[in-house]
Amino acid sequence: MEQQIHITLRYNIAIGKVNLNEIVYELKELRDPLMLQILEQVLKTYDDLIVERLSRTDIYPSKKRKGLGKHIRKDDPHNHFCRGRKVRKRGYRKKQRKISTVFGDLSLPIREVECLNCGARYSPLLSALRLGRYARKETNLEHEVTEAVIDTNYRRLIDGRSIDISLGGIHNIVVGSDIDETFKQPVSTEDLSAILADGTPVKEYQGRKGELRNVIGITKSGRVEPLGCFTNTPWPEIERIIKKRIKEAESYNIPFIYDGEPGLDDFLSDVAESQRCTWHGPRGLYHALWQDGLKKKESQPDTDKIKELIGIELPEGDFEILKEEDKQQVKTKYETSKSEIKDLIKTFYERGYRHGASYLEGLSDRLFTNIELWLKTGVIAPKTTSLLERVFREIGRRLKRIAWGWSDEAVTNISKMIMIRQYSRDKWEEYWKEKLGIKGYFDIEIESVIS
Ligand SMILES: [Zn+2]
């Protein structure tokens, strides 16, 4: 239905004195307040049109009232909707409705009607606008605030506009986001070339220290596929959630890369092959020997042996303050294990267990990399790729600016938002378009600007 808005602008111009910059500057200042007023006019007119249709049933057939006047039946204990679509005008609500928009805060007078069927009093504009009873902001604003938080320039968003939003309000937008409920579609391991996981410390409210933990997949084309972001969540819980998202492929030979965090030793071991292989080793050997014709009972002593050989425990505590004898103990165990594995490979060849032998050979140089590194440097196997490090640097840089004083949910959600916007830009745009519900039901154009 075509409508018009008439705008009259008044201006004073100091002839012979004004320059172009000043004119543009003042017009720029006008932009958001003008849009806010246009919005108000559009909404007021829409309210009038809706109420007119619902009250003048003598003019408008039910077809013209389609989608309008939805309300809950008066005094219905089950909150059923009323079928009545005929109303009497009851003027305006006592309180104007306040809605924060991307142009600033709007204070809108809203019509009230009385249903002639059930007697309920309601405001048909609100349901027509898909505004819930408690909605106080529109989604474009949420979008801009979110983008501003990610870019750490939210001050710029708020300054110079009549947007009344505090840091707490921004926090609520981030926490209230449904981002955590989305992007949960299954991921196939066939499309991934690796899975990486790591944690990074973050500062939260009252200076509390938290840990942000992220799991990402690297697709075969080298793209980052965020698998999950978590704050102060134990790794087993994270594993359970990630596993649900992963469609298990036939072969589980994608590497799982991590920097040696103890909680990640067997992480996703059903799906990916951890670089340390302490869990995978015995299981893989059992498989290989089975191919050589050995039953479980017959291969058991050898798989047990492998379990024992590779299960070298690293002493806890600071490497520097460890006693030399503790280090020596690890070193001795490492050297014995290594030579025993070599012996085992030889024995396998002698017995004709070719699968078992080549499996162990393939594994042997990866089995102790973390031990070797620890013995040399005291560092527990930092095997993260440069890609993962970059992802964390980017998240860390933003979190450092904005996460101070924030809660677990906020840190988790921001981290997820940053990841998806940065590495799955198309999905990010899709998500917002869906949320905004833009379907071509409103268009507006400038008809003429004259003086
Ligand atoms: Zn009713």
Image (cartoon, rainbow, N blue to C red):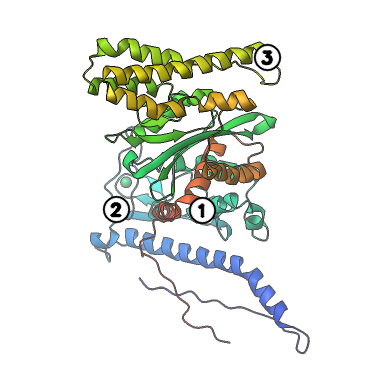
Relative image position of residue 323 (x, y in whole percent): 68, 13
Q: Give the CA distance from mark 2 to mark 3.
A: 85 Å
* Kind of residue sitting beneath label 3: Glu
Q: Residue at x 37, y 42 (%)?
A: 192
Q: Give the CA distance from mark 3 to mark 1.
A: 57 Å
Q: Give the CA distance from mark 1 to mark 2.
A: 35 Å
Q: Secondary structure at mark 1?
A: helix
- Residue under numbered circle 2: 85
* Kind of residue sitting beneath label 2: Arg
Relative image position of residue 324 (x, y in whole percent): 68, 14
First-in-chain label (2 vs 3): 2
Q: Secondary structure at mark 2?
A: loop
Q: Tell me the quarter of the image containing the N terminus.
A: bottom left
| Rendered view: 167 above or below 231 | below
Report crowding for label 1: few under 14, some 14 to 19, many 20 or more residues within 10 A (C-alpha). Answer: some
Q: Residue furthest front?
A: 350
Q: Residue furthest right?
A: 17
- Residue under numbered circle 1: 143
**Mark number, residue 340:** none
Ligand 1 within 8 Å, label 1 CB = no
